[in-house]
Amino acid sequence: MTISSAIARPYSVFVEVPQFHGGLFALQDSETYIDRDVTPGQLDAFSTNDNRIKTILACLATSIFLGLFPMAFGMISVLDALVEHNLIQLSWVLGLILAWVLTIVVSHKYISRRQKSYDETTAALAQRLVPVPRDDRRGDLRRIQTALTTIQSGHGTAYDDRAREAVAAVLDQNLHRPHKKHLIIADSAARDSDSVAIRTRALAAKASWSGDVAKAEHLVLELEDAAAGKAPAKV
């Protein structure tokens, strides 16, 4: 009996999306994203048609630094064959150089296809797979992942839906955050009509923002309590 990936893979806050990097040493790295609402089947698209051995060989073939040695050896061998008028050696060397060039071309195409596939999948999941925020929300997301890892080790996926809800709440907690200038005006003692109007709007937004932050923190604390054994394993 085959278990689908949707059932087998537990939820993870952070998703590593493969990325190729060229240069002196070509390699396959990854970029971290947040799984806001991605199905396991959609994540499988990042590994479809991947071949670890092909990837390693393609990176080796397209590394500029590693390519210098066979090319240098080939040019020296060509010059040596020309000086000695050795047509057999020359044909062999030229054949090897051609094979190496073809290997580089094929490797470049393989890497380009894989990178295009990763980029297309990431773009298609733009609203579900989001970049890691650079503000204090990153710390809250790490707290969720830490708690979830502990829960999953003992209770499986019982809290996965709660974790998704917490992630969404953390990501959206600043949607109603008022502008800094509006907060300054709200805290001022000015009584002119413009200041009063902005103060009213800023205080309302600040109240909504405070509620959003409180909701996110409550959901994170719930997960941390569950991880610490202070909440039931089943929800």
Image (spheres, helix red, strand yellow):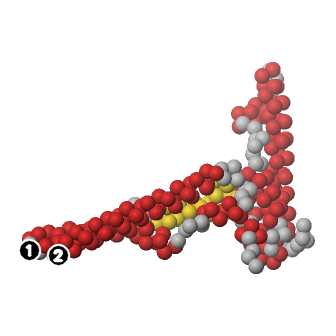
Tag 2 near tag 1, CB within 8 Å: yes
**Which residue in the structure is indicated by mark 2?**
89
Question: What is the distance, in whole Å, between disc 2 and disc 1 at their CAs?
Answer: 9 Å
> Which quadrant holds the N terminus?
bottom right
Among the two numbered marks 2 and 1 on one chain, the one whose residue lies closer to the N terminus = 1
Quadrant housing residue 66: bottom left
Q: Is residue 222 left or right of residue 140?
A: right
The amino acid sitting under disc 1 is Glu
Q: Quadrant of residue 10?
A: bottom right
Residue at image coords 90%, 67%: 235
- Kind of residue at badge 2: Gln
Residue at image point 84% right, 36% down: 204
Quadrant for residue 157, please give it: bottom right
Q: Residue 103 versus residue 36: which sits nearer the camera?
A: 103
Tell me where residue 216 appears, x and y as whole percent: 81, 54
Side (left or right) of 21 relative to 104: right
Identify the secondary structure beneath mark 2.
Answer: helix
The spot of residue 16 in percent (x, y) is: 61, 63
Q: Which residue is mark 1?
A: 84
Q: Compared to 174, does 155 lie above or below?
A: below
Q: Secondary structure at mark 1?
A: helix
Identify whether 86 is placed above or below 36: below
